[in-house]
């Protein structure tokens, strides 16, 4: 069986990094990081049921 990888953690970190970068543009990196974390938690929750198998994305469960 192919190795299964969940990528919801990568989604979370990516959203948090984008939020922090946008916060830096506006001079408030802590606010941008917090907003990015909120968006990251929400998107990771939605994507938690997806599992990457090889080059196909399938719904878990």
Image: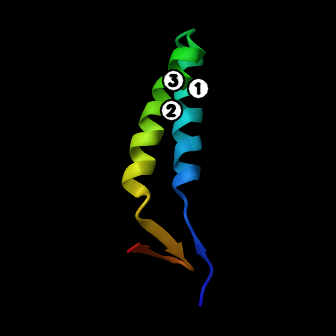
- Residue 22 shows in this picture: no
The answer to whether marks 3 and 2 mark residues whose Cβ atoms lie closer than 8 Å is yes
Lateral position of residue 50 relative to residue 21, left or right? left
Tell me if residue 49 comes above or below residue 41 in the rendering.
below
Q: Mark 2 falls on what kind of element? A: helix
- In the rendering, at what x and y percent does residue 39 appear? 42, 35
Based on the displayed image, in which of its 4 quarters is residue 57 positioned?
bottom left
Q: Mark 3 falls on what kind of element? A: helix
Residue 34: give its label: 3
C-alpha span from label 3 to label 1? 11 Å
Image quarter in which the N terminus is found: bottom right
Residue position marked by numbered label 2 in the rendering? 37
Mark 1 is surrounded, within 10 Å at the Cα level, by few (under 14), some (14 to 19) or many (20 or more) other residues, namely: some
- In the rendering, at what x and y percent does residue 52 appear? 52, 71
Residue position marked by numbered label 1 in the rendering? 21
- Image label count: 3
Q: Mark 1 falls on what kind of element? A: helix
Q: Hey, which residue is sitting farthest bottom in the picture?
A: 1
- Residue 4 shows in this picture: yes
- Measuring 41% from the left and 57% from the top, which residue is drawn there? 47
Mark 2 is surrounded, within 10 Å at the Cα level, by few (under 14), some (14 to 19) or many (20 or more) other residues, namely: many
- In the rendering, at what x and y percent does residue 31 appear? 51, 16
User: Of marks 1 and 2, which one's residue comes earlier in the chain?
Assistant: 1
Front-most of residues 8 and 25: 8
Which one is in front in this view, the residue at disc 3 or the one at disc 1?
3
């Amino acid at each position: 069986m192919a190795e299964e990888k969940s990528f919801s953690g990568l989604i979370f970190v990516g959203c948090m990094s984008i939020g922090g970068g946008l916060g830096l543009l506006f001079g408030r990196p802590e606010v941008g990081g917090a907003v990015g974390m909120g968006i990251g938690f929400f998107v990771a929750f939605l994507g938690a049921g997806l599992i990457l198998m090889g080059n196909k994305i399938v719904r878990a469960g």
